[in-house]
Amino acid sequence: MIISGAMLVVAFALQPTGSANERLIGFTEMRTDLPGGRHANVRTMRASLVNADGTGRRHIAADLANETDAWTQFAGWSPDGSLAIISRGWQSPDNAKREEARRTFLFTKDGWLLDSFLVEFASGKATNLTVVDRVSFYNSGLFFWPGDPTKLGFTALINGNSHPFRMDRDGRNKVDLTKASAGFTYGFNSSRDGKRIVYHKNYQVYLADADGSNVMHLKTGRSFNFAPTWSLDGHWVLFLSGEHYNCHPHVVRADGTGLKKLADRSGYKGVIEFLDVYDFHQGSSDVPVWAADGKSIFYTAQVGKNIELFQAAFDGQNTRLTMSPDDSLHYHPQPSPDGKKIVYGAKRNGVRQLYVMNLADRTETPLTALKTGHAAMWPHWQPTHSK
């Protein structure tokens, strides 16, 4: 199914949610041990939901993956929690074989198709916004523009380079915010007031106005700068800085001053392998995130044989949150909107599961109980309660 024309709308029934008072967590389930390499397992990805107490686990937008070699990934929420952002991907088996042989991605319009959908909870309708006035066959990173309910942001792959775009809520009027750039732009997001953007291009961090103008390079003196995100108040930017596979959480003021290292990952490469078979891409980036109040960050670092979860404050105080058996790996922390809990992945006993921690007493609640050869990845808290 190659979709290239008008907007695609798919309707399907969502299974009932849990308690109206229970916040939901979106995530992605997948197989990890199927022979054949990366694509053989990635095509099993399914966007999923679970209540924050671990009950009610189920798939969402199943009809979007009803074609062989297609998959879905849970990618985020609307600000009011009424819409889920779902990525729908497809790759041809022949292209996947070429990638395995060459050990690199081969993004071609005949071999790949990735679009971003919005799924309504009330009606179950899924709407493809990146198919409207299509600019690329590979569109990811869809988000709702803060401070402007009429706009969305996303990232499109064009002529081998990644570009940040802004578009209207109906998918029209797509604007390339780095139109003249030949660099590979990634990690694109907006400040909370919607007036400024940040991204990294060729592993350097740049700030700009919402329309892409007034670009400023945040100079760190380091070769590798990655995954920038805004603080709650818009005064600081959090990102990784250092060398490739040896980079650490840093913050810098929005005017480029006050560069500060908040923590050291102690030898952790910052990549969580999500497959149990060989993966030529080596896994998924495991990056630091802001706490809900913007006064500290959560990150992962190496401790002996483990990758453990930490919290670091601006004053330099570091708190270790997990203490696990040897060979445990933690990844992708995400704080709840009220700041009282944190969801994260943990590979213990060989299986990648999701957990929620109550930060007040550090008690854990398992969200998944998957069997060997399966994984739960990339959790996202629902911003508000389901209605």
Image (cartoon, rainbow, N blue to C red):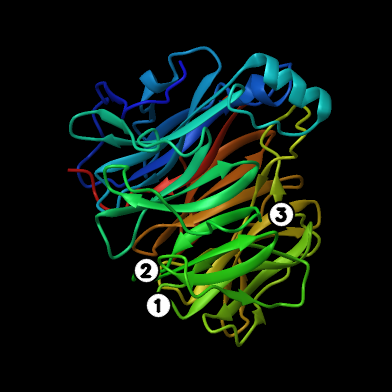
Residue drawn 65% across and 15% down?
93
Q: Which amino acid does label 1 sit on?
A: Asp
Front residue of this view, candidates 309 and 109: 109
Where is residue 146? Give x, y as percent.
Answer: 33, 62
In the rendered image, which residue does mark 3 sit on? 270
Considering only vertical position in the picture, is 254 above or below 55?
below
Front residue of this view, candidates 235 and 221: 221
Q: Which mark is residue 192?
A: 2
Considering only vertical position in the picture, is 93 above or below 72?
above
Q: What residue type is labelled 3?
A: Gly
| Cα separation between marks 2 and 3 | 26 Å
Q: In this rendering, does residue 370 appear at all?
A: no
Residue 246 quadrant: bottom right
Q: Which amino acid does label 2 sit on?
A: Arg
Horizontal arrangement in the rendering, residue 110 relative to residue 384 (left or right): right
Label 2: few (<14), some (14–19) or many (≥20) C-alpha neighbours in 10 Å: some
Considering only vertical position in the picture, is 387 above or below 113?
below
Mark 2 and mark 3 lie on one chain; the one further toward the N terminus is 2
Residue 107 quadrant: top right
Mark 2 and mark 1 lie on one chain; the one further toward the N terminus is 2
Where is residue 245? Give x, y as percent.
Answer: 79, 56
Disc 3 or disc 1, which is closer to the eye?
1
Label 3: few (<14), some (14–19) or many (≥20) C-alpha neighbours in 10 Å: many
Mark 3 and mark 1 lie on one chain; the one further toward the N terminus is 1
**Callout 3: helix, strand or loop?**
loop
| Cα separation between marks 3 and 1 | 27 Å
Where is residue 178? Give x, y as percent.
Answer: 53, 59
| Cα separation between marks 2 and 1 | 7 Å
Where is residue 383? Give x, y as percent.
Answer: 31, 53
Q: In this rendering, does residue 189 appear at all?
A: yes
In the rendered image, which residue does mark 1 sit on? 233
